[in-house]
Image (tube, rainbow, N blue to C red):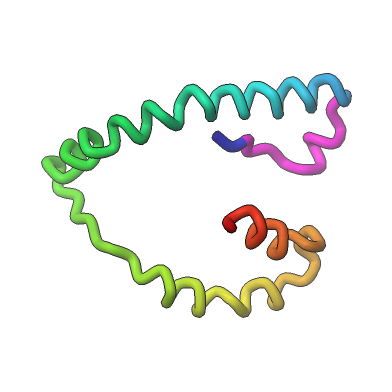
């Protein structure tokens, strides 16, 4: 589970509160992720009954199409792309 919070606001918080937020987000992820995986087929079936059409994304095409994004926004967090790539391995 992730934690969606502005970096500037997060950094303005006391260190103990920052750590509390990180710890709780991690704990929530350990609890929610298995439930979500277990219920995935049930969720998909309910969505399909509601009219949702699922398609298989061409992930390689998306990857190629977005490669230039990292060069287009050089002021993003330095090393972000490399850290994400390393985490995905």
In the rendered image, which quarter is residue 86 located in?
Answer: bottom right
In the rendered structure, does residue 17 fall within the stretch colored magenta? Answer: no
Residue 31, position as x, y percentages in the image? 49, 22
Residue 64, position as x, y percentages in the image? 51, 79
Q: Residue at x 35, y 71 (%)?
A: 58
| Residue 10 drawn above or below residue 65 | above
Boundaries of the magenta span: 3-13
The quadrant the C terminus occupies is bottom right
| Residue 73 drawn above or below residue 34 | below
In the rendered image, which quarter is residue 73 located in?
Answer: bottom right
Residue 80, position as x, y percentages in the image? 73, 59
Q: Is residue 66 left or right of residue 19?
A: left
| Residue 47 drawn above or below residue 36 | below
Q: Nearer the viewer, residue 56 or 86?
A: 86
In the rendered image, which quarter is residue 11 located in?
Answer: top right
Residue 71, position as x, y percentages in the image? 71, 77
Q: Is residue 64 left or right of residue 21?
A: left
Q: Is residue 60 left or right of residue 13?
A: left
The quadrant the N terminus occupies is top right
Q: Residue at x 42, y 77 (%)?
A: 61
Name the residue furthest left. 49
Q: Residue at x 84, y 27 (%)?
A: 13
């Amino acid at each position: 589970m992730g934690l969606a919070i502005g970096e500037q606001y997060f950094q303005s918080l006391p260190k103990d509160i920052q750590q509390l937020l990180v710890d709780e987000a991690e704990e929530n992820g350990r609890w929610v992720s298995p439930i979500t995986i277990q219920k995935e087929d049930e969720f998909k079936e309910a969505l399909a009954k509601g009219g949702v059409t699922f398609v298989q994304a061409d992930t390689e095409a998306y990857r190629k199409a977005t490669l230039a994004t990292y060069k287009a926004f050089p002021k993003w967090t330095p090393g972000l792309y490399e850290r994400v790539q390393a985490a995905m391995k």
